[in-house]
Image: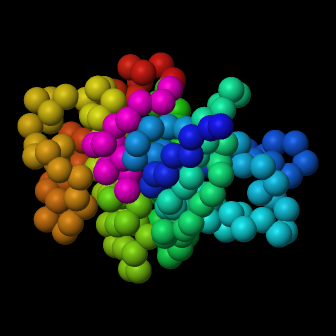
């Protein structure tokens, strides 16, 4: 019998598989980046289909089998709602994360960065979505070892919050952040 694992996850994307299945890309609190097969989730009577929509946050139940992870259950915590522009910002962050993270490895800092960005972007009336995106991408690159704190000399990497004072600090050093981000992404060759 297989063990069932319960964890919080951000849905970073999906792809269709066979007639009614999907492979859901999750960034989980306990396992890092996971691709889990969700059987029959595209059918109308599926109870999980609304819980794991792209760019949402959910509590998921996963089973590790011989052929990888399977999604055994899901309950929505926060859906991707609000301004379409902010959902698009989180979609770009999710795409970059999927591109850069390889293999399953727990990363508490990276999960916190993505979860806080998700919370900040899915609020009503987000004015600084572009700055939040820059800070989040810089933190993702920092969490993966592509940017060092010494290079930027800022306290933005010591926490994961996106409060007003953090956004204002990031706006003052916007050009330096963008330069470091572009250099780091170019060096990844991905």
Q: Quadrant of the N terminus?
A: top right
The furthest residue to the right: 19
Residue at the spot 41% in from the left edge and 30% down from the top edge = 105
Q: Is 112 a magenta residue?
A: yes
- Residue 105 in view of the camera: yes
Residue 35: name its quadrant.
Answer: top right
Front residue (pair 12, 7):
7
Q: Quadrant of residue 162?
A: bottom left
Residue at point 39%, 80% (across, down): 125
The front one of 88 and 10 is 10
Q: Position of residue 154 (x, y in %)?
A: 10, 43
For the image shown, how many numbered marks are present on the structure? 0
Magenta stretch?
103-115
Work out whether residue 178 can be spotted.
no
* Vertical position of residue 44 compared to residue 116: above or below: below
- In the image: residue 169, left or right of residue 147: left
Secondary structure, magenta segment, majority class: helix
Coloration of the structure image: rainbow
Residue 169 sits in quarter = bottom left
Residue 23's spot in the image, x, y percent?
Answer: 70, 43
Which residue does the image show at 81% across and 58% down from the upper left? Answer: 42
């Amino acid at each position: 019998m297989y063990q069932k694992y319960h964890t919080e996850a951000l849905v970073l994307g999906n792809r269709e598989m066979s007639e009614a299945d999907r492979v859901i890309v999750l960034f989980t609190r306990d396992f890092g980046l996971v691709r889990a097969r969700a059987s029959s989730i595209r059918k109308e009577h599926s109870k999980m289909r609304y819980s794991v929509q792209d760019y949402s946050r959910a509590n998921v139940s996963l089973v590790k089998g011989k052929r990888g992870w399977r999604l055994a259950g899901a309950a929505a915590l926060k859906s991707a709602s609000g301004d379409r522009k902010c959902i698009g910002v989180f979609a770009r962050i999710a795409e970059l994360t999927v591109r850069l993270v390889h293999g399953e490895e727990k990363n508490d800092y990276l999960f916190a960065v993505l979860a806080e960005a998700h919370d900040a972007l899915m609020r009503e009336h987000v004015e600084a979505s572009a700055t939040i995106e820059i800070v989040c991408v810089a933190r993702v690159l920092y969490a993966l070892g592509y940017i060092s704190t010494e290079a930027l000399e800022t306290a933005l990497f010591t926490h994961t919050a996106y409060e007003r004072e953090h956004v204002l600090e990031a706006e003052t050093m916007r050009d330096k952040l963008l330069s470091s981000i572009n250099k780091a992404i170019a060096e990844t060759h991905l």
